[in-house]
Image (cartoon, grey):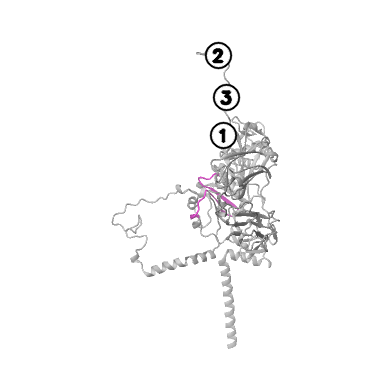
Amino acid sequence: MIVIEGLTPEEQAQPAPAATPEPVAPWLLPLRPVLETVQPGRVLRIQGQQAQAEFRLFLPQEALGGTLTLAQRSSIDVLPEASRIVVRLNGAEIGSFEPRQFGALGAVEMPLGTAARAGDNLVTIEAQHRHRIYCGADAEFNLWTDIDLSQSGLAMAGPALGTGSNAFIAALTAQAASGRPIEIRAAETPDADILRELAQVLGRPLPDEALPIALARPWTTSAGRSFARVTLLGSDTDRATIRRGGDGALVLVIEHQAGAAPRLALVEELLQDDAALPPPVLPQVPPGQTTTLAALGVPTIVTEERYFYRKLDFRLPDDWLLLASQKARIGIDYGFAEGLAEGALLLVKVNGTTVRMLPLDREAAPQKPRLEIPFPARLLRPGANRLAFEAIIPGNPPDEPCPAGQGELLAVLDTTDLTVPPSPRMRMADMAQDLAQVSPEAVQPATPEGLARALPFMSAFRDAAGGGQVRMTVAGIHDLGRMPLAEEGLTPRLLAMALLPSSAMRLDLPEVPAADAGADPLSPLGAAPGERTMPALVESNWLDRARAFTLATLEPALDGMRRLARPGDGELTEWFAARKGIAMLLSPEPGHLWVVLGPGAEPAKVATALAVAVHSPVGPRGQVSLLAEDGSWSSWSAPGLMPQLEEPVSLSNVRSVVGNVASARPPLLLGGMLGLAWISAAIAVAFVLRTRERSRS
């Protein structure tokens, strides 16, 4: 017996108390928002009188009987008794609640029910808000419900998850949502081709979502809690298994024979999942035909909202192009309630441009006579486009709550149609079409040291339908010197200034001696003696003032003439001067895209923004596009680009071909017309001279 000094024999004989295990926080399988760009923060806002948001939720088999948790709060302007938040899973309602959480976040729990399935699930949160004080379009912007994504999802104990493929994919989503990278651990840095293929295999079950992948050494201690990681392990056999690590994380162990490459086909077979949600597919509008909303899968649109916005996205062929004066047409069948307040309007928009404003405060009818709305076909683009209906209906009166049961205010019938004129098969250089042709195999880092930065991009993109003929190079701000800058005025300094935060920009100015008391107050600091910022008024004459007045008066006309001569978005330096971003997409040469990441950009978020932009009409376009912190894209198109014809010229298409070329290069049209005029004049002069010579003889 070991005698412990200070204890009696009776105390020594008593068994030691059992150690109390430390509580382990449950895993949170996150809600992943379905958006047309990246979510800038952890809080997603559902705003408006009637609004909804969609999310993906990947569930393993062990979580099907679980409970969904929503961390939420609402605006104080929401009247709870007349408002409702409805939650649906795969189309089936699983719960609803009144929005009564106005201060700090509150948790609402609801069981998944029988609609849940193993794999990806679609969660829809529909908010039905009503203002407690006011009524009108302005008041609806104060109605919102926030969902904290970092605390919303399905919570379950980590040990309750098995080691199946669905459990590992769910752990990947939890790891990505935690803000910490998914580590690939190996004794030696794997070959670049192996890492590229592994990133593709890991991202394939989660299309259009980039995984934050990082490289690490074996036995590395994670900075935070780990849910999933990958380990490459030398062995005497080729095998891929999922095991539980000592820290509770699910580990994909890829064993390979010494000196041989891992067989990643085994990993792909292991993670193959048939329950993924189908990719988004925009309906096609065939040119030359009339397509109704019903044919696009859109039923009759009815609303009770005072501010209403409904977008309808569709696709045109990639080789469709009309830049001249051709007209497309919208035939709208609509109706609205009687007694709407003065100033009520319905705006019809095409790719953000209003093509018609329809008053809703007079001559009300359940169905108005059909209205034909012609608009310039050049507002449409090859690929993804957007038709939108926006209604603004003031309250009557605006300083009282909207009456309960007011009924439908506006309806746009599903017989509304769109007619797009046909065009010859032509294309114009545009990064939107190139982006759709990027495949994971075509992604490469600017330098070998930047491979880890490019891995999230390799995991985000799908296999391109056209074979992936476009390359994408991922670079950092320090790699700008390697980029081919073909655009006029585009320099590495200009790109760096657009991506660097304002606090990091400093101008290296030479030191200027202090000005003495006799210095000219109009001279700038550091100016030579006698040099001034502006001439004194007493030294200016009427000719200088007249010249300045003339230039200021003619500047708008001169700017219009410059834009007419060179259609596009103006000078690139002026475009950059008014914009800041965290990342940039450039198309310096055909078939090659460059992604430049700013100092504060997260590669996974930028990769996700690019992957979802393939299906969105508000993604990057033109030759230069800047990604802002809020996830929006600003695009610049180079002036004077020439469209390329992809079919023989014939009598049926020559008019459209000439119109496109003349619209893209107006100086060519002007030069051609002047040339024809000179030729005609020369022929006329020659004819007159020859006739006179004959008459004299």
Q: Which residues are magenta?
A: 576-602
Between residue 485 and residue 66, name the one nearer to us: 66
Judging by the rendered image, the residue that carries numbered circle 3 is 20
Which residue is rendered at x = 56% and y = 72% of the image?
674
Give the left or right position of residue 651, taking residue 562 as reference.
Answer: right
Residue 654 screen position, x and y as percent: 66, 67
Residue 16 drawn above or below residue 345: above
Query: Which of the marked residues, 1 or 3, is nearer the chain's N terminus?
Result: 3
Q: Earlier in the sequence, mark 1 or mark 2?
A: 2
Q: CA distance from mark 1 to mark 3?
A: 21 Å
Q: Amino acid at mark 2?
A: Gln
Percent of width and height locating residue 613: 60, 50
Q: Determine crowd level at label 3: few under 14, some 14-19, many 20+ residues with C-alpha closer than 10 A.
A: few
Quarter of the picture containing the N terminus is top right
Give me the disc on residue 225. Answer: 1
Q: Could you tell whether 655 is left or right of 224 in the image?
A: right
Answer with the quarter of the image where residue 516 lies.
bottom left
* Circle 1: residue type: Arg
SS for tag 3? loop
Mark found first going from the N terminus, 2 or 3: 2
Question: In which quadrant of the rendered image does the C terminus lie?
Answer: bottom right
**Magenta stretch: residue 193 in it?**
no
Q: Within the image, what quadrant is residue 363 found in?
A: bottom right
Mark 2 → mark 3, Cα distance in angstroms: 21 Å
- Write down the residue under mark 2: 12
